[in-house]
Image (cartoon, rainbow, N blue to C red):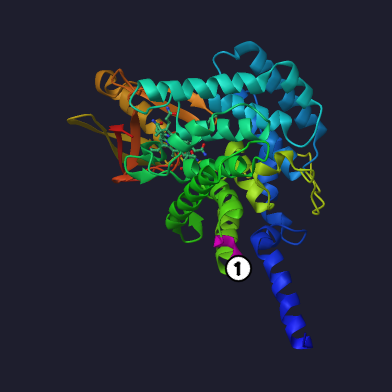
Amino acid sequence: MRPSCQLALAGLLVFSLIPSQLCQMHAVNETNFWHIEPLINTMLNAKYTERFQDANVLLTFRLVGIKSQRLEQQLSGQIKEDINSREMELTSGELALDILALGACENQDREFIRGAHLVSKLGVKFQAEIQNMEAHGGNPLTNYYQLSLALLALCLFNGHYSITSVTYYFTPENKNYYFEDQFSVDTGAMAVLALTCVRRDTQRKMGASTQRKISGYIASLANKIQAEGKQGLLGNVFSTGEAMQALFVSSDYYKNERNCRETLRTVFDNISQGVFYLPIAAAQILPALMGKTYLDVISPSCGHNPVKFNVSTEKPDMATPTTAPLNILVKYSVRINTTSHTQVTVRKGSVFLDVMKAAQEKNEALFRFTVEETSWGPFVTSVQGISASSKDRTYWKLLSNGQPLTQGAGSHVVQNGDNLEVRWSKY
Ligand code: CBY
């Protein structure tokens, strides 16, 4: 072989080895570590009195190899306690996240998973989701994000799932990937991760045609995720982390260095603006920035990290915002079939929820509402006594100036003159 040919071949070899890792390699290193420090501090300094923030944060800490014995012990203890006290009420996705977090990177919590038979219990919950779809027009008990989390955990931890059900229910055309005709990037991303695990599952003897089918689903979902790409984000800023993970394992998107750099720049920008101030938001974006995916929880390199973390345990100097005692005026309406309007005055810097409270005080009959705490903050469960129902796929959608919010009622800051609305909707 001529030397030039050898050179070309060597080049080709290097090229074919590296690209799939490209974005993962360009992700965070010692020099740009400061970009992600706020995320780590957010997670380290949160209070964790609410049980549901625990699992996502513990999973991320272990996966990316941040060592904080104090927090690990606290979170793992809280999760186990929660499982012991309300195992029956846990949804499929909650239990799946608990298993992923407890089982991430070989550690002694795996003994708890075995002892409490968590994986087979998750199998039962997954089956119940499928039975509900069979009985109720294709609607699961929860949603496809959770079903995908459940499938992912079952697949990674050798649980039982029916491959026939998977090929039947996870087709990219399934309506559960959509909320009112809008493809849910978060949901698609989690499904890609789960299906990729299923495709790689060597313990399972799968016919070539099934294998082909699943590969087709993965490719199609990855395309849908890419189609939602805009200005460096995939979907919105909160779905981008998990979407990156999905594309790392399923597509060439991040083999293109420009795509990689664009996403990182946009995400770093948002971090510096404090957009990921909720622990769960920080937990969901960080693994991808460190080049990790949830599929790595069982890999021997899980938790290994070339970057030396210099994790400070001190609380960061939070600049307390000087609350100027300025008032703003906003419009607020509740739309069912007809619309009820009002105008309220709230403090500058108020969030959507404050507006709802002010309206409720003005007119209890029209504007009363209830909320339920979730890891993403308060979720509006009812307005005027009309309750959202996952069974009927109904919910109260939040909008500002006609556009759906990308944050919950407790996070979205309103501006003077905004036209805010809660709208009875179907997804
Ligand atoms: N987690 C889940 O089950 C949630 C899955 C999720 C896809 C989630 C987004 C993604 C994630 N990464 O966690 C999801 N939302 C779902 C499934 C839903 C539906 C819940 C149905 C059900 N019964 O399970 C539903 C009703 C369609 C829904 N989300 C509604 C809303 C709106 C809430 C309004 C209200 N009534 O309070 C809202 C505010 C959209 C709107 N304009 O009305 C909304 N969701 C938002 C903005 C979000 C994002 C939160 C971002 C933030 N910073 O607050 C989200 C990350 C998330 C949570 N929803 Co939903 C999506 C995004 O913007 N990228 C598993 C469990 C174990 O934890």
Q: Nearer the viewer, residue 13 or 297?
A: 13
Asked if residue 67 shows in the view, the reply is yes
Query: Of helix, strand and loop, which one carries label 1?
Result: helix
Quadrant holding ligand 1?
top left
Please, is residue 346 above or below residue 133 in the view? below
Prevalent SS, magenta region: helix
What is the x, y in percent for residue 241? 57, 48
Asked if residue 47 shows in the view, the reply is no
Q: Nearer the viewer, residue 327 or 174?
A: 174
For image coordinates 59% across by 37% down, the residue present is 280
Residue 315, quarter of picture: top right
What is the x, y in percent for residue 373? 50, 24
In the image, the residue with mark 1 has its CB under 8 Å from the nearest atom of ligand 1 = no
**Left or right of 22: which side holds 396?**
left
Residue 319, quarter of picture: top right
| Numbered range of the magenta stretch | 252-257
What is the x, y in percent for residue 311? 79, 45
Residue 34, quarter of picture: bottom right
What is the x, y in percent for residue 148? 53, 35
Can you say which quadrant of the picture contains the C terminus?
A: top left
Please, is residue 391 above or below residue 149 in the view? above
At label 1, the amino acid type is Glu
